[in-house]
Image (spheres, rainbow, N blue to C red):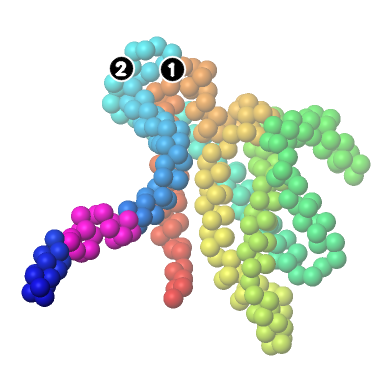
Amino acid sequence: MTETTEVASVKTHHATPSPRRTTRSGRGPRGHLTRGRMLRRATPWLFLLAPLVLLVTFTYVPVGNMIYYSFTDWDGISPDRNFTGADNYVQIFTRPELFRVFFVSFYYLAASAAQIAIALYFASVLSFNLRYRNLFKGLLFFPYLVNGVAIGFVFLYFFQDGGTLDSVLSWFGSDTDHAWLGDPASANTSLAGVSVWRFTGLNFVLFLGAIQSIPGELYEAAQLDGATRWQQFRHIIAPSIRPVLSLSIILAISGSLAVFEIPYIMTGGATGTSTFVIQTVKLAFQFNKTGLASAAAVVLLLIILLITWIQRRLVPDEKVDLV
């Protein structure tokens, strides 16, 4: 009786599937853990799926079409697109009237340097405890909040003959018989001045945020050592905001090459104020040369990428060890 019971129990033990075999088949707890781990890994990609689809659809696909159009003579309307090779790119670099607009960007590049210097000065001053500093912060940032079209129309009346600027200058006995938007030099200088007034607030906010993130203990230690404001700026503020300053320089250079809104509204590109973007828009929609305009846009994109790459090579990001 005892031997029969032992044999039956042994057979029952061998007939029962082991948990290890069930786990390998994916039906046990370990299989559920594997599926849960895979689901956790796939969840971020599921959330990124919609933004990636929108990014590819509205950014990379249009860029690819633009590059394709730049090798054709498409007029933007006709379904016929004849392949012309690099002829559009040759025209951009050989026709003086097409390449000359790049020199207008130097006015805005100088204006960008001025606005960075002004923004850095006010951000450094207003980061200290001064009276009415919140009021000055608002006044500096307010122009950036105003719509660019409104700014263009306001300064159009500001610079017109007998306008606001001439009226203010007449109070000081200055000669007001000057067409501020009548010749290329004064027109581009005036338009660049408008960009300084508008975009200084953006750089100011970037610099102010970077400066306020500096630990206060550094300022206290510097004051105990007898450091002046200039020494605090040179040895504490300037090294700490270097990444933000690098970003502002990239934005300034790319923005000076892609100026469009203010000169298009105020002058329409007349009197030698046409920028590269204004010329590209006119080529595409006024002269129906979409292929040539696409080539101009590709050239502008490559120039901005090249400048950004050079800047990143000259001023690389500082690596931070978080361990």
- What percent of the width, then of the height, locates residue 180? 73, 34
Q: Quadrant of residue 121?
A: bottom right
Whether 277 is drawn above or below 122: the answer is: above
Q: In which quarter of the image is residue 160?
A: top right
Q: Which amino acid does label 2 sit on?
A: Asn
Residue 222 falls inside the magenta stretch:
no
Q: Which of marks 1 and 2 is nearer the N terminus?
A: 1
Residue at the (46%, 41%) spot, across then down: 51
> Residue beneath label 2, please?
82
Residue type at mark 1: give it: Gly
Which mark identifies residue 76? 1
* Crowd around label 2: few <14 · some 14–19 · many ≥20 (10 Å): few
Foreground: 28 or 193?
A: 28
Label 1, label 2: how many angstroms apart (C-alpha)? 12 Å
Q: Position of residue 280 (x, y in %)?
A: 49, 28
Image position, residue 114 (x, y; %) = 65, 53
Q: Can residue 218 be seen in this view?
A: yes
Which quadrant would residue 183 be assigned to in this image? top right
| Residue 9 appears left or right of 181 | left
User: Secondary structure of the magenta portion, mostly?
Assistant: helix
The image shows residue 284 at horizontal and vertical percentages of 48, 22
- The span picked out in magenta is 16-34
**What secondary structure is marked by label 2?**
loop
Residue 186 seen in the current view? no
Q: Is residue 23 magenta?
A: yes
